[in-house]
Image: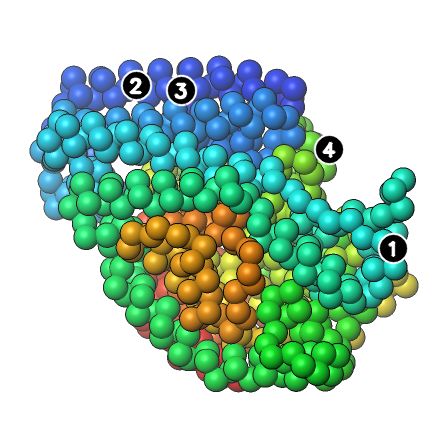
Amino acid sequence: MTDSTAAPHPLELPAPSQTAAWLEQRTTTLLAEARDAVERLKADRPTDALEAVRRWDAIELMLRNLGAPAHTFSELHPEEEARARGDEAVQQVERFRTELSLDRDLYEVFAALDPAELAGRDPLAARLLERVLRDFRRSGVNTDEATRARLAEISDRIVVVGQEFGREIRDDVRSIKVTPDRLAGMPEDWVEAHPVGEDGLVEVTTDYPDYVPFLMFADDAESRRRLMIHYLNRAWPANDARLKELVELRREYASLVGYDSWPDYDTEVKMIGSGDAVAAFIDQVSEAADASARRDVALLLERLRQDRPDAEHIDRADAAYYAEKIRRERFDVDAQQVRRYFAFTRVRDGLLDVTGRLLGLEYRPAADAVVWHPDVDAYDVHLTDTGERIGRIYLDLHPREGKYKHAAQFDLSPGVAGRQLPEGVLGCNIGRGLIEHDDVVTLFHEFGHLVHHVLAGRVPYVRFSGVATEWDFVEAPSQLLEEWAWDAEVLRTFALDADGTPIPEELVARMRTANDFGKGSDARTQMFYAALSYRLHAEPVTDVTELTKELQNAYSLYPYVDGTHMAASFGHLDGYSSGYYTYMWSLVIAKDLFSAFDRANMFDPEVARRYRDLVLAPGGQKDAADLVADFLGRPYSVDAFAAWLAE
């Protein structure tokens, strides 16, 4: 148990070589403590609702304290043994959670309590009790014994298959080899970082620091296409069967607990409310973006035909390259010139300075922190006005073998007021030298999750700690923070060239104009991903590739590329299941949140502090719609998003 009288202090992490053993011991200890606490709760059957809720939250804290670092190390730790032990610990935690969710004796402890009576004493505890009862219902606790046994099997298998699905993506790094002459168009520093091998060839991998710039800059169309096909075929064919099993298991689970489909089950606890609403939202956004998207693609095709007059369409192998051409030729924005201003170290430091100034935070290097890799930096987070330490963050920003391949925020420790500090990790795959402005935007986006986790770590119940709002709201604060990565005044504080000259304001203005080019086609592409996520779970699917082809041709204006199987490496199909729509749903809200800020004064302390305190700091203590209304003074609206899309 955590000592509630002790001053909160950071989690004591082990030396990297001891992580596997640390996780094993931690799993044994915390699961035993949690199991004992559950048995005592069932034996005591407290009639005081507040006591019962607090005891349940203490159990949840034990499980979070085990599951959070286990999951983080399963994705980020450099040693395979530690990653494997993290996977095993996550499986054990989830298996125990499933056992609890189907325990009728435990359910009856809470079913005998009255949330309305509790609301008069502790409204937040009443909210927690309502959530606990809802969780039990959704788990199928009231089904017969055979059904509960099958639900337990399904839950356990979903965790295992999901881990296998993600591991396959993480470990399957593919590559092409090209002669040095085929690197024409690539940035000089990129070429220098890719020496010619003994075979006279240069290896280009599907990892982001290779893949993204190669598709943007490499003049050789054949090599771009080869690399793109390898990228879209990562984890295939192995993940094809896993994906089918995942969606079938989810479909069966939803049916057993009384829902028409997995999307209906999944959306019951989200802002959007129903599976049908997801389908309608996808079509609504697609229609709204259609005219803009078709203008984008027509312009790309027109530019492609200057090089290939007989081209009938443009696909993903050429889209990024010719989008870059258009930005350079029409908008006078050359990404290779832009990247001169974005040296990684200055960007990282600028990210900390900007978010600290905006949100009233100070990041102090944590000299006592133990890190799992030399690349990792640790900082203690303090409030600037009081000096209070409110959490710790870790930045793990460069690619390496065995590491998570995308960009995400991971929890190390949930925060609970007076008990323990929130700790989180930013895991990215950013280059070490000059980086793309897209990488800068990614860093701001993911850091939005990180500060949300830390700022919302001073709540009384762990259930509402951190990024604990409805899942289709969680991206909104991150998408909002991206706006600061596009502001000239903000960028000029850290975007300097080798001579120390800040990025010109007029260049940033052109970058913004150029970035608007493609937002329609990007929105349609996002709706393709959302439709794939939704349709896979809404109806039986016999051929994932055929469904991918159908939906890509229906929603994206870039046609399906024969011989590719992108769903096998679509990692969001594990964690987000049918809910990839949430990125666009959150963007609608993010644009509305940003309408409260003044573009001429992005650091207005009054607005920024209200946003920090009313939207981020509460965590999940209120519904997301109420958090937004508290900040805006009105319900959220689609108007700002519609205006942005029409610009």
Residue 254 is situated, as x and y percent measured from the top left of the image, at: 23, 45
Residue under the image location 83 percent in, 59 percent down = 183
Q: Amino acid at mark 4?
A: Pro
In this rendering, the answer to whether 104 lies above or below 524 is above
Along the polypeptide, which appears first: circle 4 or circle 1? Answer: 1
Q: Which residue is mark 1?
A: 180
Q: Give the quadrant of residue 330.
A: bottom right
* Distance (Cα) linking label 4 and label 1: 32 Å
Q: Amino acid at mark 1?
A: Pro
Q: Are marks 4 and 1 in contact (CB under 8 Å)?
A: no
Quadrant (top left, top right, bottom left, bottom right) of the N terminus: top left
Marking on residue 374: 4
| Label 2 Cα crowd, 10 Å radius (few <14 / some 14-19 / many 20+) | some
Residue under the image location 73 percent in, 33 percent down = 374
Residue 343 lies left or right of residue 579; in this view the side is right
Residue 126, can we see it?
no
In this rendering, the answer to whether 592 lies above or below 146 is below
Q: Which residue is mark 2?
A: 35
Residue 573, can we see it?
yes
Q: Which residue is mark 3?
A: 30
